[in-house]
Amino acid sequence: MPLIEVILGGVILGGLYALVAIGFNLQFGMARIVNLAYGEFLMGAAFAAFFMYTLFSINPIVGMLLSVPVSFAANWLIYRVLMLPLVRRARTRDDLEGQTILATFGLLFVLRGAATLAFTADNRYYNYLGVPLNIFGFTFAANRVLACVLACIFGGASLMVLNRTRFGTALRALNIDPIGAELVGIDVRGMAGLAFAGGGALAAAAGTLVSTFLTFNPAIGIEFTMKALVVVIMGGIGNMAGCLTAGLLLGIAESLCSYYVDSGLTLAVAYALFLIVLVVRPRGLFGTP
Amino acid sequence: MAASAEDRRRRRTRTAAAIGALVALVAVLATVPLLTSDYQLSFMVNVMSYLVLTIAWALFSGTTRLVSLATSAFFGIGMYTVAMSIKILPLYASFALAIVVGAAVALVVGVLTLRLSGMFFVIFSFGLSEMIRELMVWWEINQTHTMGRYVYVPFDTTMIYEHLLGLAVVVFLVGWLLRRSRLGIALLVIGEDETVARQVGINVPFTKVAIFIVSAMFMTLTGALMAPRFSFINPNFAFNPLVSFVVVIMALLGGLQKLWAPVLGVIPLIILSERLQTQFPFWYSVLLGLVFMVIVYFLPRGVTGLLEDIWKALGRPLALPRGFTGPLLDAWAWLSRPIFLPRGLAGIIEERWLKIMPRANEKR
Amino acid sequence: MAALLEVENLRKAFGGLVAVNDLSLAVAAGEVLGLIGPNGSGKTTLLNLIAGTIRPDAGKIRMAGEDVTRLANHLRVRRRINRTFQLVRAPPNMPAIGTVMAAVLYGAGERVRFKDAGYEAAGWLGEMNVLTKADRRFDQLTYIEQKRVELARALATRPRVLLLDEWLSGLSPSELEGGMSVVWSLAAQGIAVILVEHVMTAVRALCHRVIVMNAGAKVAEGRPDAVLRDPEVIRAYLGDEDA
């Protein structure tokens, strides 16, 4: 029964991708900022978890109480200080997207370079809950299962906030029609800042989870950013349910590929999937043609 | 509105003078290897290769306004195709093969992504180089069992330099012709408003893909020509995302409105980059990122805007001290001004030129 | 008169909203067909469908006997269908003549030499009385000048069917008179004009025939004076209680 096990492994990975993509989608879909430095916060949180665990033996899950708010605050500041001038001077949405791509591209190199300086380029790994866990007769590493469960909880909580609260409704209005949102009295820039910060917080949560079961170094950020971009485009910009589906799809595809072909081809799988979706459904998985 | 005879004659003299100056410049540049040291020559090789890459980038991104981050992918394709085929093919044949491979990849990527919203293209171009690198690593490890290739060919730095110089002349001519052609006008209209472009009868996806392929072919050939410079090449070396990044900075710094503007971005950045690499090797990525952000934030209108503002600020009467917040508010307001196509250093020169030569102002 | 452009049972829905519902029309060379109806009745959608900006869900569009329903926008331009936009559109940073040159080079069908395209474009601008503004950037022109440049852009592709989307709206009375004579002269040259318009004086004076749309469907068709007296048309415009 290896196939089912491979697919379940993919689902577990996919849950994590979905979380990464939901955070990215908050920044891209709601705040309209293509943040190429998104993965760097994920990487930062992974290192934070690593050092807290190895130096002070703080449980990574508890450590999130620190890293998530810090990342939230840092992203909020980035929005206010670095993104807002671009938002103000951009004439159209395309203009804004282009400008933020350039600015965050620079930020990506700054953050990655700083991380390499501070933590060295070595691969890091720590053992947390690396015990086998038996579920319905299949064996999984406990840390992976925990990561998936927590990813589902965080992702689900974000979806609840977006769909069930006044705040979430305002955020969704931002995605659909920023000008209309402003006209009905929503503080567009304030809300966009919070969405951006919220995205950063989810990146930190995802980073902590990644660190529990993957080897990481300062260069992993960009790969997660690329995957998040692919998932968001497949699922639909601003569409969180789409993100979840596309994330699971990516996780399963990647898991299948690493079992049958090679585990080094994860990005190629993501882009191949992206291309297939582009050809078959040019407006995304859930877009109306 | 027939142009007067005198007008035409003046224009012809000006064109002849420009061509003459250009030929002289190329002739001088061609003798560089005879006069300089090895270090200076390798600097010039760097300048030439980035010049071709940046102009080729501007051919596509400057007109369609889609930020392409795929430069390193094509550069790498060129370099690695040569590395793989050099043992089987003669040198020039492997250059030709590289161009074919690069064009084919550009065709596939362009057809699949350029039909759709610009965002898809940008995202794809962002990951293309990483993806190809990953595929090549996998291929080399599992199929050919060689990690990296040796390139030993009788093609020394002087030859590389002369070929790159020739390529630079060609890419410059292509850009020049493009501005005076049907295709060039179509690209301008597409860059400004695609709906209108369709409505004047332009085949928008076809045009975009065509210019993308042309631009990619130049990038690929640059990579191919650079391959013999390095005796050992592996995928991680060939597909270096920093190349895409540096090319975008150079183009933005130089400006996009003039064809020759990239020269002004390439030279200072190569000097700066070499300085940074030798003096602060560990800080290189951070500092380069900061330089990039400074250009994006502070030079949306090129260096001209900066100088104008300083000039204005100097001429302003003294005001009462405004405390800490005053300058901060100014900086904020200044950062938030609308963006235009970056004019870069070329903008300043043009401005000064118009001041000195008011005649040139009347040409249109 | 033989129809030049025929539209058969055209239908387009956006989600649940049926914007154009089973609509047919035909227009002959030299005819001015008015398309009127309240806001949101699907007039602009219909124009978008005919011009090829969007694709219909069902139905057929035939141009001079050829089925163009599936043709892309730029190919329809080369089949001699062109349009203007409700909110005037042109590349804002280009000189006015640039767009017209592009239209001459790409839309006119036969190969025009690059050198000649400028002269030809200037000719079209001259025909629209805006030649003196040829080197201005589009966003520096006045509204009426922009409209004229846009029409020059459309005409430079030598259209046989021209779709004008509220081209006469927002003009002052004297400008309106000039604009109407432009439309009139187009029809006199044998161009089939479809005119979406709210300015009723223009509709009455120019149109040979009028189609009234409401909620995506055709509710009346005929000579302007007759149609505009039709009680159903009045109801569509003013609502039941006011009729």
Image: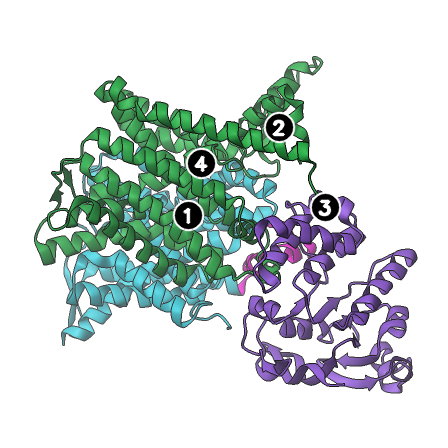
Question: Chain letter of disc 1?
Answer: B
Identify residue for label 2: B329
Q: CA distance from mark 3 to mark 4?
A: 31 Å
Q: Which is more foreground, mark 3 or mark 4?
A: 3
* Image disc number at residue B251: 4
Please state the horizontal and vertical placement of residue A124, each as a whole percent of the image: 19, 43
Mark 3 is surrounded, within 10 Å at the Cα level, by few (under 14), some (14 to 19) or many (20 or more) other residues, namely some
Q: Specify the chain shown as green.
A: B
Among numbered discs 2 and 4, the one appearing first in the sequence: 4
- Segment tinted magenta in the rendering: A164-188
Along the line of sight, the residue nearer the viewer: A186 or B47: B47
Question: Chain letter of disc 3?
Answer: C
The reply to whether the magenta stretch includes residue B161 is: no
Please state the horizontal and vertical placement of residue C20, each as a whole percent of the image: 67, 80
Chain A hue? cyan
Along the line of sight, the residue nearer the viewer: A78 or B177: B177
Identify residue for label 1: B68
* CB under 8 Å between discs 1 and 4: no
Q: Residue at x 68, y 53 (%)?
A: C121
Among numbered discs 2 and 1, the one appearing first in the sequence: 1
